[in-house]
Amino acid sequence: MILVPITYRGGVYRHSEITDLIEDLGGYIVQKHMIAQEVVIQCFVPKDDVELIRAIGKPLAGEVTDSPLVGTEIAVVSMSLEIHHLPHPSCDIAEYVRRLGAKSNMVGMARGVGKRIAGLNDEERDVINEHDIAVYLLGNFETCIEHKMPVLLRGIEVPVVLCGGPDKDVLERIVEPKVDGYVGNVGRFMHRTKESEELSKLDEIIAEITWVLSKRREELAKDPLSVSPARLMDVIREQVPAILDVTSPTPLTVQMSGLRVKLPYDTYADVLRKTEIEDGITIGDIAAIEPSRMRDYIIVRVRPFSETNMVI
Amino acid sequence: MQAIEYFEVECTEKLGGEYYRQIANDVLLDHNLLRVIHKMHIYIDPKVPIFVAVGVLKKVTTLVRVGDIANVNPQEGKMTLAISDETWLAPMLKIFWDRFGKDHVEQPDRFTVILYGVTAGAREIEEIAIADPSQALYKDLIYALKCTCPEGFRVRSENYGAEKFSFVASEDTLTDAGMALVREKFALMGETP
C-alpha cells in the first residue's frame, strides 16, 4: 500500500467522519488543527483512496490537496537571529513551508554571520542533522558565500537547499562542497514578501525542497524502512499515554525516516524501546532510540530493511 | 527616495549593490529617516571587507514647544492646556513639575493638563521648550546604519557632527584606508567631511 501525503481542509461539522474514514482506510493523521469553524488535517492516506476521501468530503465543504511536505521536518538555517535576518526572510520562508504541511524549525546560528568569522558549532551541526532537509538562508554577496560555505557545511549529512542573493548559476558555480538544491535571488532583505514576484520566489524554494525530498524518497524506496514513521507515531500515541499530556503543538513529529518524540529521554527511552508494534516486535528491534540535541527530546531513527530484515 | 537629493550605493558586486540599495531604502523608511537625510553615499566592498556610509543631514527641525502640542486657555486662577499630540506629554509634565511644582500641575485626563496659580502668561507658557528631537536623531541614524550594514561587520567607527555623518564598518581592524574612503565618498557628493 502506497501512502501519499495530503491536506484536508473543511468545516468542523461532521469532520469526525473524515478522521474515521482516514483511519479505516489505513491512513495516518499527522496533524489536526481546529481553527474557529475550520479544520485542517494533514495526513497520509492510501494513494488509491484519495478520490474516495475527496468525494466523501465534498458534501462537508471539504477540500483535498496534495501536500508533498507533510511528514517532513525542515531546518530553516538562519545566519543569526538578529534584525538583519529576522523576521524577513527567515520567518517568511519558515512560515511558507509550514503552510504546505512541513514542520519547520528555525536554527539561528551563533556565529553564522560575516566572511572570515563565520562558523558552525557542534550543537548546531547535530541539530541540523536531526532534520530531513536544511534550507540555508545566506546573504547577498557571492564573495562571502563562497568563502564561508565550506565551514558552514562541515559535518552536515542531510540534504541542503541553499538560498542566496546571487543568481542560481553563480551559486552553483561558487559553492563548495556542492549541495542538493540552489535558489538564487533570495538573499537578505528587510521587507515582507508580499509582491507577486517575491511570492513566486517562495514557490521556487518550495519546488526545490520538494524536488530534493523526492530524490531522498527515491533513495529510501530502494531500501525501505522497517516501519513507516507515521505508523510508529500511531503506535506511540496508543501505547505511551504520557505523550497525550505534552502541550507542544506536535508532540510526535513525523520525519521521512524517523520520528521526534517530545518526551524526556532519560525517563522514556526504555519505555519506547520496549513498546510493542505487533507480534512481539518492539520499537527497539527496528529503530535506534537516541537522545536529541534539541532540549531533552528523543529521536527515533527507523532502520532500513537491509539492517533488520523485516518490514511491518 | 525622492526626499533625498543624492542617494548612491556603490558596490564591487553589481547585484549585491542593488540588493543593498533596497535594504538601505527599507531601513531608512522604517526608521522614518528619509525626511532628515539630504545626501547619502554607501560604499561596500565585500572582498576587503568594508562598508562605508557617508551623508549630509537636512537642517534639523527646531525645538518642540508647548504651543506646538497644546492649546493654552487662561482662566480665572488657572491655565488649561488641551493636548493635541501626546508624543511629548511626558517631558512636558516633567518640565512643569520642575518649574511650577507638583502641587500646581494636575492632569485630570489624557488630553488635559491644568496649571494652578501660575504667574506666567499664556504666551510665556506656549514658548517653553520641551524637547529637542535632534538629540535622538544620531542614535536612530547609527542604529539604522547598523541594520543596513552586513551583520558580520562588527568593528565600527561612527562620526557625527555639523549635520554630516560617516559610518565605517568591517570584520577586521579598521585602517587609515577606511578614513580615506570616507573623504573620497564625501568628495563624490561635493562635500568635505
Image (tube, helix red, strand yellow):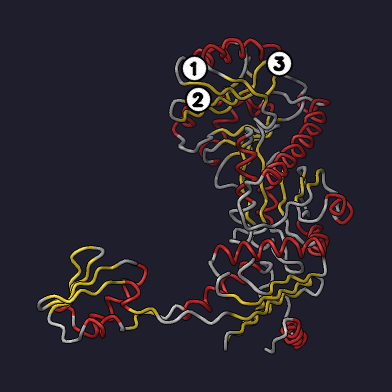
Residue A9 position (above or below residue A258): above
- Name which residue type carries label 1: His
C-alpha span from label 2 to label 3: 22 Å
Q: Quadrant of the N terminus of chain A?
A: top right
Residue where numbered disc 2 is placed: A39
Tell me, yes or no, whether the two marked residues, 1 and 2, touch with CB atoms within 8 Å.
Answer: yes
* Mark 1 crowdedness (10 Å alpha carbons): few <14, some 14-19, many ≥20: many
Which image quadrant is residue A218 in? top right
Residue where numbered disc 1 is placed: A15
Side of A180 relative to A259 (left or right): right
Tell me, yes or no, whether the two marked residues, 2 and 3, touch with CB atoms within 8 Å.
Answer: no
Residue A15 position, x and y percent, is 49, 17
Of labels 1 and 2, earlier in sequence is: 1
- Name which residue type carries label 2: Val
Residue at the right extreme of this rendering? A173
Q: Chain of mark 3?
A: A
Whether residue A282 is visible here, answered yes or no, is: no
C-alpha span from label 1 to label 3: 21 Å
- Disc 1 and disc 2 on one polypeptide chain: yes
Residue B87 position, x and y percent, is 37, 68
